[in-house]
Image: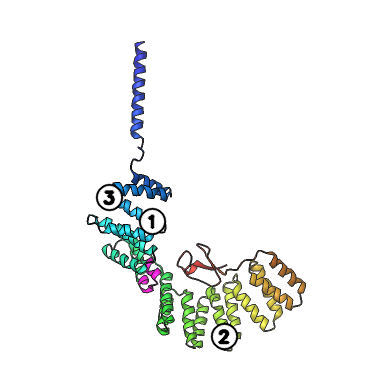
C-alpha cells in the first residue's frame, strides 16, 4: 500500500512538472499593438494594421519603424502626400540613428515617386546614394527613377555601375537606352547626333533591331534613301531571323527607288532563315500576285494557312486568291470558316511576361515595364 501511494505521488509530481514546462514553452499571445500590426500586415489586413500602428505611435513616439510603416500604408492606399508628411516629420528628429535616417529617406523617395514627383524623388535618391554608395537597393531604385524620368544617359551609367557591382551584363538593355537617347535627339532635329547614338547601340548589341530601324529612318528623313537602304540590307544579311521587322520599310524604300523587284530575294532569304514566320511569305505572295504569278501565289497562301492556321491575314489572302483564280466555292468555304470563328483584334506581338499585345514591335512592355528585345515575340 505504501509503495502504491509513493508511486502515485511521483506520477502526480511528474504530471504537474510537465504541465508547467509546457506552459513555459508555449509562445505568449501578443500584448503590443505594434506586434499585432506586423501580423496583420503579413496577413494583408492593412486597414486593421493601420489602426494598430496609430495606437502604437500614440503610446510610443520613439517607435520609428511604426511611423515608417504607418506612412507606407497611407502610400499604398493612395495617399502618398500624407505618407510623405509622416516620413518628412521623422527626418526632423535629431535622435535618429544613421540607419534610421537612411531607412526613412528611402521610404520618402517611394512617397515622392508615388505622388509623381519624379524630380524630387531623384534628388532625394541621389542624396541617399552619396550617403551609402554600397547599398545596391538604392542604386536600383535610382535606376528606375532615371528610366521614369527618361534620363537615358544617367540610366545608362547607373546600370553599367550596377552590372559591375553584381558582375552582370545587360548589353541589350544598355543598347536600348542609347536608342531612346537617339530618338530624343532626332525628335529635336539633331539627326547626326541621334545617328551616333544608334550606332553606339548597335556596337553594344548587334541584334538591336530598333537601333537599325531608327538609323535608317534618320537617313530617310534627310532624303538619303540609298544610305538607309544600305543600312537595312546589310542588317538583313547579318540578322535574317529578325529581318521581317524591316519588311515594311524595305518595301516602301524599294518602291520609292523604283527597285521593287529587289524585295523578292530578301523575302526568300527571310523565309529560309525563319520558315515559321508568315510575314515574309505573305509579302512574297503580294509580289507574285503583282507579277501575275497567281498559281505560285496560291500555293504559298495554302502553305501559310497550313503552317499558321491562326493567321487571319493568311486565310483572307487565300480567300482573295481563290476568288481571283475562279475557285469561288473554295473561297466561300474558307471565308465562312473564318467568320464562324471568334473574332478579336489580332496582335502580332505579345509580351511573354504579362501578355500585353500590340500590332507593332516593342522592346519595353508598356504594361509591366520589362526591358529586353525578347519581350516582344511574333505570335
Is residue 147 rendered to the left or right of residue 104? right
Residue 122 in percent (x, y) is at 34, 67
Circle 1 Cα neighbour tier, 10 Å, few/some/many (<14 / 14–19 / ≥20): many
Q: Which residues are magenta?
A: 144-156
Quarter occupied by the C terminus: bottom right
As rendered, which of 347 and 84 lies closer to the eye? Answer: 84
Q: CA distance from mark 2 to mark 3?
A: 73 Å
Confirm or deny contact between disc 1 and disc 2 (CB under 8 A).
no
Confirm or deny contact between disc 2 and disc 3 (CB under 8 A).
no
Q: Is residue 350 visible?
A: no
Q: Secondary structure at mark 3?
A: loop
Residue 313 in percent (x, y) is at 64, 72
As rendered, which of 343 and 114 lies closer to the eye? Answer: 114
**Is 23 above or below relative to 135?**
above
Determine the image quadrant of residue 293: bottom right
Confirm or deny contact between disc 3 and disc 1 (CB under 8 A).
no
As rendered, which of 104 and 199 lies closer to the eye? Answer: 104
Determine the image quadrant of residue 292: bottom right
Observer-side mark, 2 or 3, equals: 3
Q: Main secondary structure of the magenta part?
A: helix
Identify the residue position indicated by label 2 in the image.
254
Identify the residue position indicated by label 1 in the image.
74
Identify the residue position indicated by label 3 in the image.
61
Most distant residue in the left direction: 94
Q: Is residue 26 visible?
A: yes
* Mark seen at residue 87: none
Whichever of callouts 1 and 2 sits on the residue coming sooner in the sequence is: 1
Quarter occupied by the N terminus: top left
Amino acid at each position: 500500500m505504501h509503495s502504491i501511494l509513493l508511486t502515485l505521488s511521483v506520477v502526480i509530481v511528474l504530471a504537474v512538472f510537465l504541465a508547467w514546462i509546457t506552459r513555459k514553452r508555449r509562445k505568449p499571445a501578443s500584448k503590443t499593438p505594434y506586434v499585432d500590426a506586423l501580423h496583420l500586415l503579413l496577413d494583408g489586413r492593412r486597414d486593421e494594421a493601420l489602426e494598430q500602428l496609430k495606437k502604437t505611435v500614440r503610446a510610443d513616439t520613439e517607435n520609428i519603424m511604426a511611423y515608417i510603416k504607418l506612412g507606407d500604408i497611407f502610400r499604398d492606399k493612395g495617399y502618398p502626400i500624407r505618407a510623405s508628411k509622416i516620413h518628412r516629420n521623422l527626418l526632423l528628429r535629431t535622435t535618429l540613428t544613421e540607419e534610421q535616417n537612411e531607412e526613412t529617406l528611402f521610404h520618402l523617395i517611394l512617397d515622392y515617386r508615388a505622388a509623381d514627383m519624379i524630380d524630387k524623388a531623384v534628388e532625394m535618391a541621389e542624396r541617399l546614394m552619396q550617403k551609402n554608395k554600397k547599398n545596391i537597393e538604392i542604386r536600383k531604385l535610382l535606376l528606375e527613377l532615371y528610366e521614369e524620368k527618361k534620363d537615358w544617359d544617367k540610366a545608362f551609367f547607373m546600370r553599367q555601375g550596377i552590372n559591375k557591382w553584381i558582375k552582370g551584363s545587360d548589353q541589350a538593355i544598355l543598347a536600348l537606352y542609347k536608342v531612346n537617347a537617339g530618338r530624343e535627339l532626332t525628335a529635336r532635329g539633331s539627326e547626326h547626333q541621334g545617328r551616333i547614338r544608334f550606332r553606339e547601340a548597335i556596337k553594344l548589341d548587334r541584334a538591336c533591331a530598333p537601333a537599325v530601324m531608327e538609323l535608317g529612318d534618320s537617313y530617310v528623313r534627310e532624303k538619303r534613301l540609298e544610305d538607309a537602304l544600305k543600312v537595312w540590307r546589310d542588317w538583313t544579311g547579318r540578322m535574317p531571323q529578325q529581318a521581317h521587322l524591316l519588311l515594311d520599310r524595305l518595301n516602301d524604300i524599294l518602291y520609292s527607288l523604283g527597285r521593287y523587284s529587289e524585295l523578292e530575294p530578301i523575302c526568300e532569304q527571310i523565309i529560309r532563315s525563319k520558315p515559321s514566320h508568315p510575314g515574309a511569305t505573305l509579302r512574297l505572295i503580294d509580289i507574285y500576285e503583282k507579277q501575275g504569278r497567281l498559281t505560285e501565289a496560291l500555293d504559298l497562301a495554302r502553305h501559310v494557312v497550313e503552317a499558321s492556321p491562326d493567321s487571319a491575314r493568311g486565310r483572307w489572302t487565300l480567300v482573295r486568291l481563290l476568288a481571283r483564280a475562279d475557285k469561288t466555292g473554295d473561297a466561300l468555304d474558307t471565308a465562312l470558316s473564318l467568320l464562324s470563328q471568334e473574332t478579336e483584334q489580332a496582335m502580332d506581338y505579345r509580351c511573354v511576361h504579362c501578355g500585353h499585345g500590340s500590332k507593332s514591335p516593342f522592346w519595353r512592355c508598356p504594361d509591366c515595364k520589362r526591358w529586353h528585345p525578347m519581350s516582344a515575340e511574333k505570335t
